[in-house]
Structure formats: structure tokens, C-alpha cells
């Protein structure tokens, strides 16, 4: 039985604290008017005086126990404070949504895009111009990259020191003129592959995307705000890389249709075997063409390959 249970203090949260505050108020009232002690029986007066004395002048064991509890509470509060500080960073907040959406740049660098959504240059690396809002850790942790201890948090990353976080934040938006280049990105329906394809499209490249779920991918790209800027430079193909004949046919199609292939990003992988039925929700989408004409346009090359197979 805990002390809280033994003495009838409801719990260790709000109710217990309120009970203790009422006790303090009673003791303060007795200090102001000691005649209140006369209302108590002799036994209760002795209990009160002994308890008050043990609180005011604890023995060595009690003092050691109290000091230990203070330290435990300090560690607990520090850990909670650090969790809250990390949760306030940009990347952590973006990951709380059901579907991750890559955050846009927090502070523009003054580099405007040209017509067609093609950026004009590569942002310069800065030192602390885009660092956080004074978020700090109570306990230093080591940088994920350079292993340097740090307490001050970057506004976007919580696992890196300021120097590494600033450098990596700039890298998220680094670009180059890729007009006239052709890129092939496998597994580009979601996450890293999807973001890589968008970076290439916004840099001016012509992008070929492969995925096992081409209709769903087309609808996802269609929902991008700047879709109109690069829609004519994107083609999406349904391809299961585990099926060698399909891969050979796809490779021949790419060879026939494109004069060059400048970039190949082999992103597709299935490192964790998904349970049966994991993709059932996509089957209905893949069973029919998207109703949006712009989304259908992204699948013209894929439909051409399918017709070749059928004939």
C-alpha cells in the first residue's frame, strides 16, 4: 500500500495535491489561532504535533528519501520539457498528420521560379538565419550527424545541432537547372520517391515514374498546387519489378520512346512484407481510369504499353 492510499489521499495527480493544500491551509489556520488545538482530543493533538515536527525536522533517512524524490521529479519534468520542445519542431509536427505532407520552405531565400516552375539557382548556405524560436533542451544530446553535444534546437530538426540542421535544411530545397534532362524514378507513389520526383519536375526535368499503383499515383500528383507547371513532363507507369517480363517490356518501351536517360533513381523496395489485404483499399482505384482528364494524361505511356501487351 502506498502512502497516498494509506492516508486516504485520492491519487498522485490533482486530487492528491488538493488534499495536501487543504492540510496546509488547516496548519496555517492553527498557527494564526492556536486555540483551535483545544478542539482536538489529546491523542489527535499528539499526532498533529508529531507529524508537523517530522515534516519540519526530518531525520536523515527521510531527508535522503525526499532529496531522491526531488531529483526524480526534476528528471521527469526535464524529460517532459525536452519531449515538448522536440514535438514543437517543424519535422515532428508534420509527421503528426495522418498523411505526411512535406513542409514548404519556412523562410524564402528570394529565389523566384521561372515560367514553368523551373527554379533559377541554388540557395546559398546560411549559418543561423533560419534557426529556431529559442527552443532548448534541458539535457544535452549528441547530433545525429557530427555527434557534437547540443541543447539549442533548430526550428525544423530536433536530432541535429544548428550547423548540421541548417545545412540539411538548405539541402531540402537545393535545386539546379535540369531542363532537357530525363529522369526515371522507381517507387515514386509515396514518400521519398514521390518527393524526389517532385524535385526533379520542379527543376525542369522530364520524369518517368514507376509504381504498382499508377492510378493512385496519378491522382496524388494531380493534387499538387503547381501541377499545371510540370504536368506535360510527367509520365506514370504501372510496373511490378518482381515480374521480369514486364520489366523487360518496360525497358524496351523506354528505349524506343526516349533518346536519352540522364538519371535513374532506384527507390522501389519492399523491406517489410505487408500483411494480406494491406493494399485492398487501392484495388478499387486501380480497377478503372481516373475521371480527371489531367490525371489520365499522366498515364498515356502506360496505356500504350498495355495495348502493346494485349496485341
Image (cartoon, grey):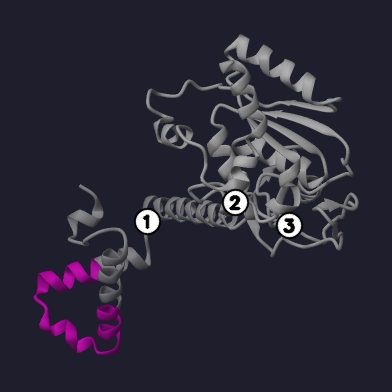
Q: Of the residues tagged 1 and 2, which is closer to the observer?
A: 2
Dot 1 or dot 3, earlier in sequence: 1
- Marks 1 and 3 sit apart, C-alpha to C-alpha, by 59 Å
Residue 83 is situated, as x and y percent measured from the top left of the image, at: 54, 52
Provide the residue designation for mark 2: 223
- Give the farthest residue toward the front: 311
Quarter of the image where the C terminus is located: top right
Provide the residue designation for mark 3: 105
Provide the residue designation for mark 1: 59
- Marks 3 and 2 sit apart, C-alpha to C-alpha, by 19 Å
- Marks 1 and 2 sit apart, C-alpha to C-alpha, by 69 Å
Using a 10 Å C-alpha cutoff, classify the residue at mark 3 as few (fewer than 14 neighbours), some (14 to 19) or many (20 or more). few
The one nearer the camera, 14 or 232, is: 232
Residue 277 is situated, as x and y percent measured from the top left of the image, at: 37, 27
Query: Would residue 96 be visible to someone looking at this image?
Result: yes
Span highlighted in magenta in the image: 25-50
Task: Residue 89: say if magenta.
Answer: no
Dot 1 or dot 2, earlier in sequence: 1
The one nearer the camera, 49 or 301, is: 301
Dot 3 or dot 2, earlier in sequence: 3
Residue 197 is situated, as x and y percent measured from the top left of the image, at: 71, 38
Q: Of the residues tagged 3 and 2, which is closer to the observer?
A: 2
Mark 1: which secondary structure? loop
Amino acid at each position: 500500500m502506498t502512502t497516498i492510499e494509506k492516508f486516504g489521499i485520492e491519487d498522485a495527480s490533482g486530487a492528491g495535491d488538493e488534499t495536501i493544500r487543504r492540510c496546509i491551509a488547516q496548519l496555517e489556520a492553527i498557527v494564526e489561532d492556536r486555540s483551535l488545538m483545544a478542539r482536538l482530543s489529546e491523542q489527535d493533538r499528539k499526532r498533529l504535533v508529531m507529524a508537523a515536527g517530522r515534516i519540519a525536522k526530518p531525520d536523515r533517512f527521510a531527508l535522503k528519501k525526499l532529496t531522491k524524490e526531488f531529483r526524480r521529479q526534476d528528471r521527469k519534468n526535464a524529460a517532459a520539457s525536452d519531449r515538448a520542445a522536440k514535438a514543437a519542431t517543424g519535422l515532428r509536427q508534420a509527421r503528426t498528420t495522418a498523411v505526411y505532407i512535406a513542409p514548404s520552405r519556412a523562410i524564402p531565400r528570394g529565389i523566384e521560379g521561372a515560367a514553368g516552375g523551373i527554379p533559377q539557382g541554388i540557395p546559398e548556405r546560411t549559418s543561423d538565419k533560419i534557426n529556431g524560436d529559442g527552443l532548448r533542451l534541458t539535457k544535452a544530446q549528441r547530433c545525429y550527424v557530427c555527434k557534437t553535444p547540443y541543447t539549442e534546437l533548430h526550428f525544423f530538426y530536433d536530432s541535429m545541432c544548428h550547423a548540421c540542421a541548417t545545412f540539411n535544411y538548405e539541402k531540402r530545397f537545393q535545386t539546379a537547372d535540369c531542363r532537357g534532362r530525363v529522369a526515371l524514378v522507381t517507387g515514386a507513389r509515396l514518400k521519398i520517391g514521390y518527393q524526389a520526383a517532385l524535385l526533379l519536375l520542379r527543376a525542369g526535368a522530364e520524369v518517368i515514374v514507376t509504381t504498382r499503383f499508377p492510378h493512385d499515383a496519378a491522382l496524388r500528383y494531380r493534387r499538387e498546387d503547381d501541377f499545371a507547371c510540370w504536368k506535360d513532363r510527367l509520365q506514370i507507369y504501372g510496373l511490378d519489378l518482381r515480374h521480369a517480363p514486364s520489366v523487360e517490356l518496360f525497358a524496351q518501351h523506354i528505349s524506343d520512346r526516349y533518346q536519352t536517360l540522364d538519371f535513374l533513381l532506384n527507390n522501389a523496395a519492399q523491406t517489410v512484407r505487408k500483411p494480406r489485404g494491406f493494399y485492398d483499399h487501392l484495388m478499387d482505384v486501380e480497377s478503372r481510369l481516373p475521371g480527371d482528364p489531367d490525371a489520365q494524361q499522366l498515364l498515356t505511356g502506360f496505356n500504350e504499353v498495355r495495348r502493346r501487351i494485349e496485341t
